[in-house]
Image (cartoon, helix red, strand yellow):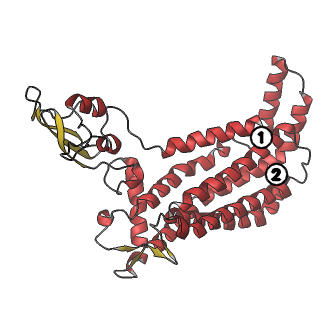
Amino acid sequence: MKKSKILIFLIAISFIFTLSACGSKKGEASFANFESIVVLSTEAGASEATTYNGLITLMGVPTDSTNYSTVEEDGYLVWEDTEEGYYVKVVLEDNKVIEKEQTGLYRSVYERPIGTKTGVWEWIIKMIGYFTYYASNLFGLLGDHYFYWIGLLLMTLLIRTLGWPIYAKSNDMTLKMQLAQPEINRIQEKYRGRTDQASQQRMQLETMELYKKYKINIFGCLMPLLQMPIFIAMYQVVQRFPLDTSVFGDATVNTGFLWTDLMNKSLLPNLPLALIVVVTMFLSNWLMQRRTKMNQKHNRNMDAKAQQSQKMMKFMMYFMMLMMGYIAIGNAGIAFYWIIGNCYQLFQSYISQRGSLKRQEQLKSKF
């Protein structure tokens, strides 16, 4: 394995572990540090309870300590944050914790019920959650019956359809880049080995003029990133719904689907869904690569840098397939959501492939 592949692998691993980390920060009330408080037990061999100083070190200065006597070392301490929505109360006696209680603390953001926090991001999640909830009974057509898989299906199709213009614009930009690539290669070949500043500046100017000619905008290449916030919000909705439907109503949502339950986190029932996730993602990427090769028939002589980039992208594709399969095993709802999304992307790729040759000819006639 080359160094570049190893570097990409390490960066991807670090990114995933950063996102999945749900630990606590010192001096901040959280599920993790609240659970680490030991309550004094009368049973033999019980661990020593947390002291006042230990609590301060672990959770920071309490928001309310008026009911605690530092002289008698008795009373209770409170950590509360109305914005975050948590409340923690710890009772001490003789400088030993004897009781604790908490509300609003969760192991991770994915276990927090939808609607328990405020803010723009939470509002977006809540709106997607609302749509999923009401779509699960076809907006009243099914009466009192709510089926999670129906809501999840309609929500995914709607979001993907709304994102289609961005997908089409990105494909158009790719076609323009493919048309311009032979001329880009000629410019690079022209200035190969000339490392002086003047030559480098001329090469950049000629490249920029070429981008202007083909109407290639660097921001157009970044357009797919505009979809990322919505996709992340959708991921959170799938993880957190229907943990608590009290926000949406009193109805019970049926989470059953075929042989499994979409809230299921067991290995064996989720394994078939995880395999379908990997297969559909592979087919989607294979179709995209096949379309790219067909569009690049006129440009067989790729430079070493472009070839290396293709290899890196291929490596990342396989890595992401394995990671998505691994995550899907742990959550049937996520697996179902990804299967819908991958199948929709297959449909998009098929439609795009049918029209790409025609569109390429149209672009050629313009440039």
* Residue 162 in sight here: no
- Residue bearing the label numbered 2: 366
**Of residues 356 and 100, which is closer to you in this image?**
100
Secondary element at image label 1: loop
Residue plotted at (71% across, 38% down): 6
> For residue 71, which numbered disc appears in the image?
none
- Residue bearing the label numbered 1: 1
When the figure is inspected, residue 345 is found, relative to residue 7, above or below; the finding is below
Give the crowd class for mark 1: few <14, some 14-19, many >=20 residues within 10 Å. few
**Of residues 94 and 204, which is closer to you in this image?**
94
**Is 118 on the left-hand or right-hand side of 77?**
right
Residue plotted at (38% across, 51% down): 122
Image quadrant of residue 56?
A: top left
**Is 53 on the left-hand or right-hand side of 335?**
left
Which residue type does callout 2 highlight? Lys
Residue plotted at (91% across, 48% down): 300
Secondary element at image label 2: helix
Mark 1 or 2: in front is: 1
Which residue type does callout 1 highlight? Met
Residue 322 placement (x, y as % from top left): 65, 55
How many numbered circles are shown? 2
Residue 163 placement (x, y as % from top left): 58, 58
Q: Give the spatial CA distance, label 1 vs label 2.
A: 43 Å
**Is 164 on the left-hand or right-hand side of 125?**
right
